Amino acid sequence: MNHYWFEYRPYDRPFKQPLHTHHGWWSNRQGIILRLTSANGQVGWGEIAPIAWFGTETLAQALAFCRSLPSKLAAAAIEHIPASLPACRFGFESALEMMQISTTSITFASPSPHQLGAVHNSYLLPTGEAALHAWQPLVTAGVNTFKWKIGVANLEDELQIFNHLMQKLPADVRLRLDANGGLDYYQAYQWLQTCDRLSGHTATVEFLEQPLSKHQLKEMLQLAERVQTPIALDESVATFEQLEACYTQGWRGMFVIKPALIGSPQQLRNFCQQYCLDLVWSSALETPIAQYFIQHVLIPSIPVVQHRAIGFGVDQWFNDAWTTEGNFEQLWQSLSLTGTIE
Ligand SMILES: O=C(O)CCC(=O)c1ccccc1C(=O)O
Ligand SMILES: [Mg+2]
């Protein structure tokens, strides 16, 4: 029988400034780092980074799952992680895939300002009026795609800030709007009509992300027929089973995929190789461990239908050891041992 030595350590990273979404204020990113070691000493790093409000298991459920596993872990146990624990599935399966890669020489570092534009990344702007100025240094550094959260304040105020933002942004900028399911049908229609009217005169609105709740796919299918501005599903396709269901129910628009939340990377790969989906890769604000797997292993293995910026411009939300130069072993050492002692 194939076994791995299994260790895990929880992490808790404060955001530099709290992130405001339709679901409220978010101030800390918490998750679990996994370390699997094979009989011949190869190490596979993995990360469980659940977001319960987004539709995954809770951190407590993920921790309980890790605690329930023996430290000498059978390979079969990883194959049988239930679909109800999608972030755990991702963490363990990606750790197994990472074991095939020699990670000792990998170092990571946030890009220096002059490198920012080199990777085609979308950058998350602060919510509300703060966006009106936050884009400027990033554009100077070469960034041309941004995401801005909406569905947080009242409609008229937000539309007014949006108007200002569209007037200020350079013409070659693409702006993504993310409502996190916080609009009703009428509000979403108003947003989309406004986007249709403003987009392309100065900056372009690339898409409106998850205008309605994940239970309103029919309404989003209807909205998509009434406007030009594309709609992208996000919360509706948080897990693999939801992605399959939305595709089956006829969604052929854009899909925002957060691999760290969706479940099995192999299942996602198979699905994307079979059907041509218009994908937007998106960060779940995970650490460089899941980020490395997603950007250097998973994304390159999936065919591109439409080139789009990846939503991993999120480093500016953190200000800790994980965003400065380091390697996986150093990050691991910086975490407390509570996860393995408990
Ligand atoms: O997708 C991006 O560009 C940035 C990541 C992002 O917006 C996000 C990050 C964590 C949790 C939810 C979301 C979201 O898209 O709603
Ligand atoms: Mg989103």
Image (spheres, helix red, strand yellow):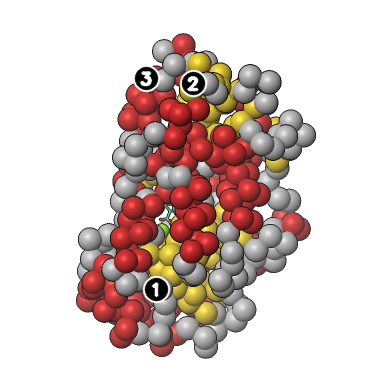
**What mark, if any, has residue 68 been given in the picture?**
3
Residue 42 occupies which quadrant of the picture?
top right
- Cβ–Cβ under 8 Å for marks 2 and 3: no
Which of the two marks, 2 or 3, is nearer to us in this view?
2
Q: Nearer the viewer, residue 153 or 186?
A: 186
Q: Nearer the viewer, residue 47 or 270?
A: 270
Q: What residue type is labelled 1?
A: Arg
Measured Cα–Cα span from mark 2 to mark 3: 11 Å
What secondary structure is found at the residue carrying circle 2? Answer: strand
Which of the two marks, 1 or 2, is nearer to us in this view?
2
Ligand 2 sits in quadrant: bottom left
Q: Which amino acid does label 3 sit on?
A: Ser
Where residue 170 sits in the image (x, y, percent)? Answer: 60, 78
Of mark 1 and mark 2, the one earlier in the sequence is 2
Residue 302 occupies which quadrant of the picture?
bottom right
Of mark 2 and mark 3, the one earlier in the sequence is 3
Image quarter where the C terminus lies is top left
Where residue 30 sits in the image (x, y, percent)? Answer: 44, 34
Task: Please rate how many residues cluster around mark 3, counting C-alpha atoms within 10 Å: few if below 14, some from 14 to 19, many from 20.
Answer: few
Measured Cα–Cα span from mark 1 to mark 2: 40 Å
List the residue tagged with mark 2: 73
**What mark, if any, has residue 206 been given in the picture?**
none
